[in-house]
Image (spheres, rainbow, N blue to C red):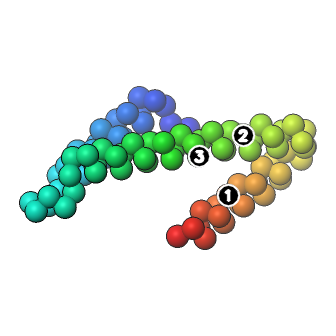
Amino acid sequence: MKITKRQLRRIIKEEKQRLIMEMNSDGTISDDEGEAEVNLMMQVEMEIDELIQLIADEAAGIGGPFRRAGIKARALRLLADKVHNAR
């Protein structure tokens, strides 16, 4: 699923507002902390999107029109397994 820059900005703004609303009165979540987390999430999402695009491009180059889907599926499965095991 592709996401536009406008949608990403809206999501980030909503997440920032949500984090601000969740701040504890004792200050356990500061303004900087919430913004840093939002920035991290944005960076992670962009890196993942770039990796997915790289996988698609390389799979097409390796497998051509017939085998690229299988190569891409195996690479995405590997990525999903790595993410799942990182928990």
Residue labelled with disc 3? 48
Amino acid bearing label 3: Ile
Residue pushed farthest left? 25
Residue labelled with disc 1? 79
In 3D space, how far apart are the residues under numbered discs 1 and 3 (Cα atoms)? 10 Å
Q: Residue at x 28, y 51 (%)?
A: 33
Q: Earlier in the sequence, mark 2 or mark 1?
A: 2
Residue labelled with disc 2? 54
In 3D space, how far apart are the residues under numbered discs 2 and 3 (Cα atoms)? 10 Å
Residue 65 shows in the view:
no
Q: Residue at x 65, y 64 (%)?
A: 82
Q: Residue at x 48, y 31 (%)?
A: 4
Q: Which mark is residue 19?
A: none
Residue 61 shows in the view:
yes
Q: Earlier in the sequence, mark 1 or mark 3?
A: 3
Label 1 neighbour load within 10 Å: few <14, some 14-19, many 20+: some
